[in-house]
Image (cartoon, grey):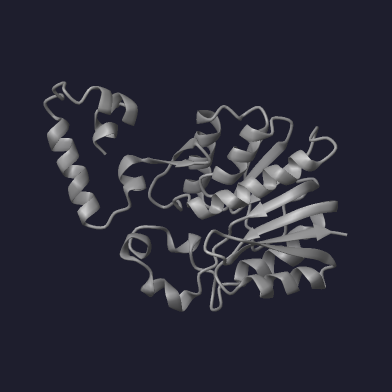
């Protein structure tokens, strides 16, 4: 927080520890501390957060990027790079929020063509800002669409669909840490009664725009992976699971036959 108020990187801040700060620095830091003590996430206080080493603007009403989700971006990048050619590969980031997943893919795989999709105007505005901030506007597009409905006409076909949709069961929302339930947007968290509403909608509606041999990659909550895998298998997908650092099945990867 002090580095942000001083408009310095952490390295610059520690380098300049012996220097005096500007007159209003103490007041601004105190205001930030009061917000943090009240439970507000530091990402909202700072107005930005880091994802895959890239700076992402974050604002209220948009989900804060999580370290766990970096595994989803890393797997997407790995699959793209394993192709014989990434030239023209199309990637769809569905329920994009800040755009962190798709933008990190676009930054790492310059030949990919990435489309960021969300139905929140605030999220789309934030994603557009992050596209420009990370200099990926050449190969990244942001459009409005609802993951619970059919894809827009003329959206085209994709080699990879990646999605971190809302997946927390409705009854569990009140039990979340106050920094989440009281500050982050419920619509980006609430996945319905069992947390699987978005998967039930996305799999039958959006997999038709996936090319043969393409991948759909989902992040999910603890205990949800097997149910999502069965949904994909019913659609003819070959399914694999990837665990997070805690050994939880966190990513469900489907390959279209």
Residue drawn at (39%, 45%) of the image = 59
Q: On the picture, is 229 further left or further right than 23?
A: right
Q: Nearer the viewer, residue 10 or 144?
A: 10
Q: Which quadrant does the C terminus fall into?
A: bottom right
The location of residue 12, given as percent across then percent down, is 30, 24
Residue 13: x and y, percent? 27, 27
Residue 233 occupies quadrant: bottom right
Q: Picture coordinates of residue 87 (x, y %)? A: 80, 32
* Closer-to-camera residue (124/230): 230
Displayed quadrant of residue 23: top left
Q: Is residue 59 above or below residue 68?
A: above
Q: Tell me where residue 49 appears, x and y as whole percent.
A: 42, 42
Q: Quadrant of residue 197?
A: bottom right
Residue in the image at 16% along x and 23% along y = 18
Q: Is residue 140 above or below residue 41?
A: above
Against 46, is 251 above or below? below
At horizontal 74% and vertical 31% (from top left) the residue drawn is 111
Q: Does the image show residue 96?
A: no
């Amino acid at each position: 927080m002090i580095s942000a108020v001083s408009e310095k990187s952490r390295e610059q801040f520690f380098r300049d520890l012996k220097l005096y700060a500007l007159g209003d620095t103490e007041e601004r830091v105190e205001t930030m501390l009061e917000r943090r003590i009240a439970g507000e996430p530091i990402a909202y206080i700072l107005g930005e957060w880091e994802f895959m080493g890239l700076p992402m603007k974050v604002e209220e009403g948009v989900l804060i990027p999580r370290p766990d989700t970096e595994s989803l971006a890393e797997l997407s990048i790995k699959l793209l790079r394993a192709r014989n050619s990434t030239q023209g590969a199309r990637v769809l980031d569905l329920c994009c929020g800040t755009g962190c997943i798709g933008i990190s893919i676009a930054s790492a795989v310059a030949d990919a063509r990435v489309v960021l999709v969300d139905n929140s105007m605030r999220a789309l505005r934030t994603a557009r800002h992050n596209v420009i901030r990370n200099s990926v506007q050449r190969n990244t597009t942001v459009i409005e669409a609802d993951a619970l409905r059919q894809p827009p006409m003329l959206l085209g076909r994709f080699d990879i669909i990646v999605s971190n949709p809302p997946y927390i069961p409705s009854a569990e929302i009140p039990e979340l840490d106050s920094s989440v339930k009281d500050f982050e947007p419920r619509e980006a968290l609430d996945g319905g009664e069992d947390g699987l509403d978005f998967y039930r909608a996305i799999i039958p509606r959006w997999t038709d725009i996936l090319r043969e041999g393409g991948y759909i990659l989902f992040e999910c909550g603890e205990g949800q992976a097997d149910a999502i895998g069965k949904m994909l298998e019913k659609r003819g997908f070959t399914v694999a699971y990837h665990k997070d650092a805690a050994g939880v099945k966190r990513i469900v990867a489907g390959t279209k036959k």
